[in-house]
Amino acid sequence: MSDVYTRLREFMDKLPGGYPESPTGVEIKILKKLWTEDEAELTMKLTNEPEEVPAIAKRIGVDEKELAEKLEAMAQKGIIYRIRSGDKKLYQAYQFVVGVYEFQLKDMDREAAELFEEYLPFAGMNLMTQPTKQMRVVPVESAVGKGKGVAPYNQVRELVKRQKFFTVQDCICRKEQRLLDNPCDYPKDLCLGFNDFGQFYVDNNMAKEITVDECLKLLDKAEEAGMVLSPSNTGEALSAICCCCSCCCPLLRFTKPAPRPADLLHSYYEAKIDADECTGCGDCVERCPMDAIEEGDNVSAMIDGRCIGCGLCVSVCPVEAISLVEKPGMEAPPKDFVEMMNKIAEERGVA
């Protein structure tokens, strides 16, 4: 029989988000850091669908009470996922990104941060090359607002108002960089969770519940700070909105050096500059997280393929020379997280 951690790596690679091998084997070091051998064996007996403890106990032939204690301890460690349904708790195996990595928020130490930093380029490549993305970029409110023809899933405040449960927590990306002695000046407590995902964070003492009004104020704070809004790539039901900076967020860090970041990140918009109105002040150049704008003698211009449609440039243009234009032929995002994950699993051939 092969090593338990090799088998766990193969098992996790068959989950929707995947868990690819790396040249250095760092992915195995991560598994050994987070899972005991017994926890690894039990994880591989779970499915990608949430199940109640009695059903799992019957299926794998173990004592129900003992199993419940083990599963809850593993959920608290963030190595499996738990959903609450009334008084019942359901458990399932869960992908590494978006998932187990983010669930290490309260327990991440310097060693884990170093391992994650080494591995994230490989995990991130899965996210960026997959046809259906797990995350997308949504414009800040002031860039599109409630404009005519703007779909509700691209109006961030309207999207948030449709959710039922709201949380805020520290950003895992900025925590990792702080542990690696690379702190940034952006606000750290601007990671927003919703519904089941948010409830998991609260139950694991990683987040606090907030009201919808508090959540909307935090979105204003994120826009003021110049942060890119990256929600789960879903329409009606959100899991999270990451308020990202290009110095810490892996997706932005890894795409920024590319010639065409717009080809790697999912967005419904791109910015256009009206050369007749632009005064060449340069405010948008400094504001852009992707270096998508070049400053000329009297006018600024967009660089083809670099705009990710975040809208941050629109909100600082003093003469309103910049606008967001919807990309043609874009389909609406999946309805919810389950639909999105099923679509990704089908694309990867692991459904």
Image: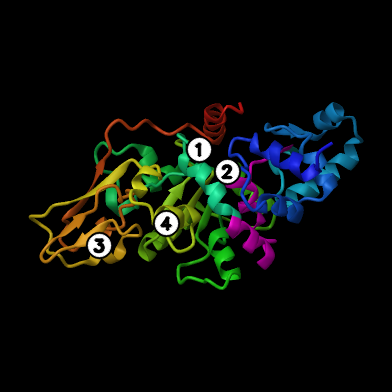
Q: Secondary structure at mark 1?
A: loop
Task: Report, in whole angstroms, how far the alpha carbon at label 3 lies from the one at label 4.
Answer: 20 Å
Vertical relation: 9 (above or below) 224: above
Q: Nearer the viewer, mark 3 or mark 4?
A: 3
Question: Of all residues shown, which one is farthest toward the left?
Answer: 276
The crowd level at tag 2 (other Cα within 10 Å; few <14, some 14-19, many 20+) is some
Vertical relation: 220 (above or below) 184: above
Q: Which mark is residue 237?
A: 1
Q: Position of residue 280 (x, y in %)?
A: 14, 65
The crowd level at tag 4 (other Cα within 10 Å; few <14, some 14-19, many 20+) is many
Q: Amino acid at mark 2?
A: Asn
Q: Is residue 206 magenta?
A: no
Q: Which mark is residue 284?
A: 3
Q: Earlier in the sequence, mark 2 or mark 1?
A: 2
Question: Disc 2, disc 1: CB below 8 Å?
Answer: yes
Task: Report, in whole angstroms, how far the alpha carbon at label 3 lies from the one at label 1.
Answer: 32 Å
Q: Position of residue 64 (x, y in %)?
A: 88, 36
Q: Which mark is residue 67?
A: none
In-front residue for pair 22/251: 22
Task: Kindly report the secondary structure that dominates the magenta region of the rendered protein.
Answer: helix
Q: Amino acid at mark 1?
A: Ala
Q: Nearer the viewer, mark 3 or mark 1?
A: 3
Q: Which residue is mark 2?
A: 195
Q: Is residue 94 magenta?
A: yes
Q: Which residue is mark 4?
A: 219
Task: Report, in whole angstroms, how far the alpha carbon at label 3 lies from the one at label 2.
Answer: 35 Å
Q: Earlier in the sequence, mark 4 or mark 1?
A: 4
Question: Disc 3, disc 2: CB below 8 Å?
Answer: no
